[in-house]
Image: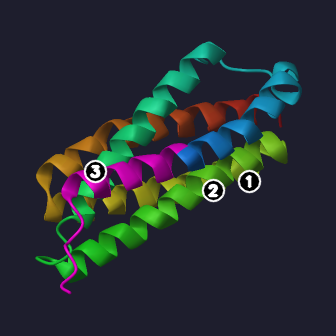
Amino acid sequence: MEQKPLSRTFKIIVMIVTCVVIGAIAGLLTQKGVDTWYTTVQKPSFNPPNWVFAPVWSTLYVMMGIAAGMVWHEMDRQRETVRKGLTFFAIQLALNALWSFIFFGLHNPFLALLEIILLWLMIYETFVQFNKVNKIAGMLFIPYLLWVTFATLLNAAIWWLNR
């Protein structure tokens, strides 16, 4: 019996669920630190209110999942580029969760700053690879890249103010 290929919609849903679950795990790590340690940290004037982060990250995780599902769907047509893109995607998703642990779990803004720079580079490379496969998937990574650029500046400012 011939196996029917997975639909594009199924792949997108799988990737959205994966991203949201990873985000939820990172959010659990974050929440404990936000409620305790983060309240004692000196923050820059451009620090957004805490309530902004959850809806922004939720939206970004959904957009990442849509993009990854769209790219995964092209595996039969562009195998090597898709594999490369999904590899960078997995690395950046792991680094995304690791940042929350380093910053909020270990209370280490300096190490988190070094890590978020690496995260930014992996997001950028994911964007480049996704853009080669599907322009819309690439575009879906632009808000994420911009937000992590802002988060990097925020992380750097928090480190500087609390060193």
Is 26 situated above or below 49? below
Residue 68 position, x and y percent, is 32, 56
Mark 3 or mark 2: which is in front? 3
Report, in whole angstroms, how far the alpha carbon at label 3 lies from the one at label 1. 29 Å
Which residue is under mark 3?
67
Residue sitting nearer the eye, 150 or 20: 20
Q: Quadrant of residue 130?
A: bottom left
Residue sitting nearer the eye, 22 or 145: 22
Query: Which amino acid does the dot numbered 3 rest on?
Result: Ala
Which residue is under mark 2?
115
Q: Residue sitting at 34 percent across and 63 percent down? A: 125
Q: Judging from the image, what secondary structure is the residue with disc 3 in?
A: helix
Magenta segment, which residues? 1-20
Q: Residue sitting at 46 percent across and 48 percent down? A: 17
Which residue is under mark 1?
111
Residue 11 in magenta stretch: yes
**Earlier-in-chain disc, 3 versus 2:** 3
Residue 53 position, x and y percent, is 57, 24
Q: Residue sitting at 24 percent across and 66 percent down? A: 6
Mark 3 or mark 1: which is in front? 3
Decide if residue 133 is on the left or right side of residue 142: left
Q: In which quarter of the image is residue 24?
A: top right
Report if the CB atoms under discs 1 and 2 are less than 8 Å apart: yes
Decide if residue 14 is on the left or right side of residue 104: left
Query: Which amino acid does the dot numbered 2 rest on?
Result: Glu
Looking at the rendering, in which quadrant would you find the C terminus?
top right
